[in-house]
Amino acid sequence: MRSDLLYWRAMRDYKPAMSFDEDVAERDRDTVRGDEEAAVAFLLGHASGGPALELGIGTGRIALPLAGRGIRVDGIDIAPPMVSQLRARPGGDGIAVTVGDFADVPVDGAYRLIYVVFNTFFNVLTQDGQVRCFENVAAHLTDDGSFVVEAYSPAFLFRLRDDQYVNAEAIEVDRVTLDVLRHDAATQMIEESHVRLARDGVRLNPVVQRYAWPAELDLMARIAGLRLKERWGGWERRPFTARSSNVVSVYGR
Ligand SMILES: C[S@@+](CC[C@H](N)C(=O)[O-])C[C@H]1O[C@@H](n2cnc3c(N)ncnc32)[C@H](O)[C@@H]1O
């Protein structure tokens, strides 16, 4: 067998819901990323009074504070454990959530703001699915509406050695947590697992993503009849450059 075939074997039978089980949902409920205030301020500016729809709403890290600013926020999520944790949070029962694949945008009505943050767009694992997502978003956007996509810039992948890394996330007396990642440039796929080794056993938290460069996102938007209105290197509206770790893109008609 050729060595490159031996080298790359995608995580078989992986489905995004596997990354968001009860354990993850419970931990996620209390997780902050540090960008919440800036993200909500940015999204509020594009909501034009709402309503807003979050794709992959999770446990409401962004949706809850945005709703707290007076915007009606609906959500879509594929993982019932994440939705249960959202429901249990203050204000969570006031948010209408549809359980389903956000690439289908399985909701009624039109939104002034549709957004997908924290690399969640890359959880749709095919280019077809990602284009379908843009098309369905366009069908649910008001004429003056905005679609905001926030994700990492794939540029960091150029700096990996042998297209992979192992990072020590935590080293404690009774447990070690490793972040293990592998990249395939040909398919634009990333396989990652957070591996927790502890006295009581091993826990794996696999994640697979199909990343897209900003230019590919712009083409998906054009296919869907949308155009790029703004692009920034973060919620604080820094210019997007080759060194930016994050990309915030705003699409509209
Ligand atoms: C990284 S979490 C982000 C949650 C939230 N947006 C935040 O910023 O904290 C990704 C969320 O997207 C959901 N998700 C992933 N792929 C999905 C899909 N194809 N359709 C619907 N939800 C999906 C997961 O269940 C999870 O709740």
Image (spheres, rainbow, N blue to C red):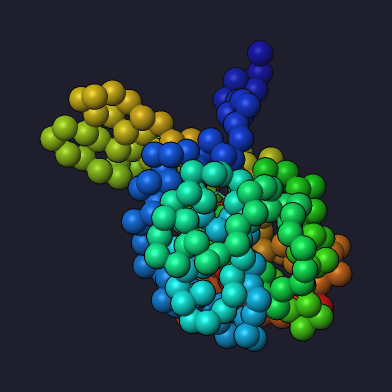
Camera-nearest residue between 36 and 185: 36
Residue 207 seen in render: no
- Outermost residue toward the front in this view: 93
- Outermost residue toward the left in this view: 173
Across and down, in percent, residue 190 comes to 57, 42
Q: Quadrant of the C terminus?
A: bottom right
Q: Quadrant of residue 17?
A: top right
Across and down, in percent, residue 226 comes to 81, 72
Residue at position x 42%, y 71% from top?
36
Placement of 92 over or under 122, stated as above or below: below
Residue at position x 17%, y 39% from top?
172
Residue at position x 70%, y 78% from top?
112
Across and down, in percent, residue 239 comes to 55, 80
The total number of labels drawn is: 0
* Left or right of 103 in this view: 154: left
Q: Quadrant of residue 180?
A: top left
Across and down, in percent, residue 39 comes to 49, 74
Placement of 233 over or under 32, stated as above or below: below
Placement of 93 over or under 226, stated as above or below: above
Placement of 21 over or under 154, stated as above or below: above
